[in-house]
Amino acid sequence: MLKTFILSIALILAAGSTSVFAEYPLIQYTIESRDPLYSQQQQDVELWYSGVENSPPLMIFRYFPRSSENLFSVAAAFNLPYESIATLNEWDAPGLLSPEKEVLIPNIPGLFVPETPEGNWQRELADNSRDSEPVSIKVGSTSGEIKTFRFFSGEKFSSAERIRFLGSLFSAPMRDVKITSPFGYRSNPFTGGMSFHPGVDLRAGMKTLVIAARDGIVKETGTLEIYGHFIIIDHDGGYQSVYAHLNEVLVSAGETVNAGERIALSGNSGISTGPHLHFEIRRDGKPIDPSRITSFYQ
């Protein structure tokens, strides 16, 4: 019965075939004796790697990673290249896997390239040539959207794509970067006491060009007493980037921006000791050290 159910929602990999997946089966444990769906996924992967003529049809499972798991440990548990999981879930960096949040898992390896790319990373994937012929499929994402992908069975990232994917999650928000005040507790320049600094300060003169540190959607622009003129951008994976003490804002709320796109000019607005850029990264609303996931000096 289990095998029949799985095959009933599988996509038969015939040239030009297209299918919309329905409710994906949920794998609860990565232990074959405890989860027959995981056992089936493992059998399919092993059969595909064995090189048999009639390889398993492509299908998709759901899985909720444990708090101790990351992209690479999940990929190892499912015997898949990390590229297969990352592209199916439309991630452009390893850090976008979130524990306890649903992840889509294929039963065979390959690359999932969106037919309608969004952002620099997806356009890069779409522009690069592959060795195999793709199959067009429609996938219901974890957000509920139906998206069309070209599935390249067995393909992996090129060396350039691998370097890009494994690099930092964010790029520098200015061309020439020097950190003048780091993330964390520091002596407050106005009170002299210790206070928490939720971002980093970057050296910048008046009206230095500020660029988006990652593809995203502008959530908010405005003016606050402390931050002065500011911009907040939403990014995949629950991340936000914040740009403050600006002289001029060049984007509006709701606008889609790409990494490297001009968004503001630096300044000295708000409570500030001089012209500079205050740069923050938040995940799920909590500030994290930008230096850990930003390529400031590349």
Image: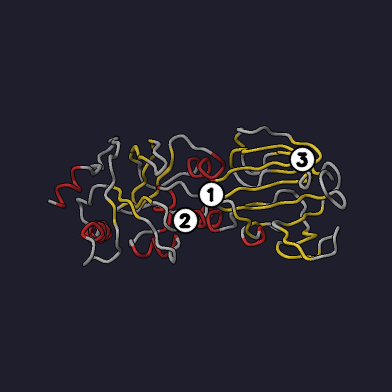
- Residue 176: x and y in percent read 77, 52
**SS at badge 2:** loop
- When the figure is inspected, residue 64 is found, relative to residue 125, above or below; the finding is below
Q: Nearer the viewer, residue 181 or 58?
A: 181
Left or right: 294 as drawn, with respect to 94: right
- Residue 3: x and y in percent read 16, 52
**SS at badge 3:** strand
Which residue is at 33% across, 38% downward?
A: 137
- When the figure is inspected, residue 196 is found, relative to residue 15, above or below; the finding is below
> Mark 3 or mark 1: which comes first in sequence?
3
Q: Are marks 1 and 2 in contact (CB under 8 Å)?
A: yes
On residue 98, which mark appears? 2
For disc 2, the neighbor class at 10 Å (few under 14, some 14 to 19, many from 20) is some
Q: Are marks 3 and 2 in contact (CB under 8 Å)?
A: no
Which residue is at 52% across, 40% downward?
A: 123
- Looking at the rendered image, the disc whose residue lies closer to the viewer, 3 or 2, is 3
Q: Which image quarter: residue 49? A: bottom left
Q: Which residue is mark 3?
A: 229
- Residue 267: x and y in percent read 83, 44
Left or right: 74 as drawn, with respect to 183: left
For disc 1, the neighbor class at 10 Å (few under 14, some 14 to 19, many from 20) is few
Which residue is at 87% across, 53% downward?
A: 273
* Viewport quadrant of the C terminus: bottom right
**SS at badge 1:** helix
Distance from the alpha carbon under mark 3 to that under mark 1: 23 Å
Q: Which image quarter: residue 202? A: bottom right
Which amino acid type corresponds to the residue marked 1 in the rendered image? Gly
Which residue is at 43% across, 48% downward?
A: 87
Q: Which residue is mark 1?
A: 238
Q: Nearer the viewer, residue 1 or 137?
A: 1
Which amino acid type corresponds to the residue marked 2 in the rendered image? Ser
Distance from the alpha carbon under mark 1 to that under mark 2: 9 Å
